[in-house]
Amino acid sequence: MNTQTTRSSEIGPWGLLPISARQSSQRERLAKRRGLIFDLDDTLYPRERFIRSGFAAVANDLQRRHGVPAGLVFKILSRSFTQGATGREFQVVCAELNLSTREIPYMLRVFRAHKPNLWLPYESSETLRKLRADGWRLAILTNGLPSVQAAKVAALALAPMVDTVVYAEAAAPGGKPDAAAFQAVLDRLDLPADRCVMVGDDPNCDIAGARAAHLRTIRLARPDVAVTPGNEADLVIGNIADVPKLAGGLLELVALDAA
């Protein structure tokens, strides 16, 4: 066999294919591959469930160590969270129950280390199932302490539903919106940016970060989040169940833009 021929051709169904045909075939295979990258908190499940799960763990710990009724502690923490003291809940507990503020670092460790009591909403599990059945490669890209986020992923039983989970702060300082975080998940999926769509709720970390990394974007709208028009996602949806019927159209737009 001619050596030059073997280098410039490959075997196809009907014999040798020239390089141009091989390259075209590779492009077609790549065009059929597509990926969806999901944020975790407030996208695949409501983050408030994790907060309240952590409050329950802290309340039970304070009851065990100090004899303070767990129900009372949980009530104070929940009230603080919903009535303007977000981020200062442990300080409020110490003030109202006359506990030393030296308890705060310990409460924070209990909160972060607890085993979350979480469940994945039906809409999220069905969305992931439909997308995987339709051939999408799926990933989760999440900010937060990797150990805490891994506990959430385990509690939600998400690992078998996706191809990969990337903890953004392990990939880049501060995580999203750093471009390195998005590149890390693209590398895991083995896909280029123009074959992937980012789905998230945060206009800065999820949407602006993904756009800067050249991904198409879908924002899951939240009533407490306002976005200036120039910074909006390619699509805004009110329910994650809308993703399977809309995401493919975004990648078709990418192909049209490139044509």
Image (tube, rainbow, N blue to C red):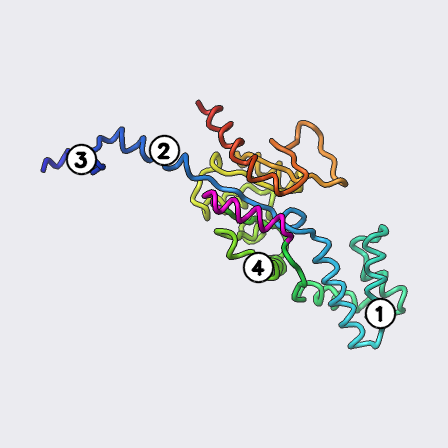
Question: Dot 3: what SS?
Answer: strand
Q: Position of residue 238 (x, y in %)?
A: 68, 38
Q: Amino acid at mark 1?
A: Ser
Q: Callout 3: few (<14), some (14-19), or many (20+) C-alpha neighbours within 10 Å?
A: few
Give me the residue at 57% from left, 38% from top.
210
Question: Dot 2: what SS?
Answer: helix
Q: Is the C-beta separation of discs 4 and 3 under 8 Å?
A: no
Give me the residue at 51% from left, 51% from top.
162
Q: Which residue is mark 3?
A: 15
Q: Mark 3 vs mark 1: which is more N-terminal?
A: 3
Looking at the rendering, the stretch of residues picked out in magenta corresponds to: 121-137
Left or right: 144 with respect to 74? left
Q: CA distance from mark 4 to mark 3?
A: 47 Å
Disc ID at residue 214: none
Q: Amino acid at mark 4?
A: Ala
Q: Closer to us: mark 3 or mark 1?
A: 3
Give me the residue at 59% from left, 58% from top.
153
Q: Which residue is mark 2?
A: 28
Question: Dot 1: what SS?
Answer: loop
Q: Callout 2: few (<14), some (14-19), or many (20+) C-alpha neighbours within 10 Å?
A: few
Left or right: 151 with respect to 57? left
Q: Amino acid at mark 3?
A: Gly
Q: Mark 4 vs mark 1: which is more N-terminal?
A: 1
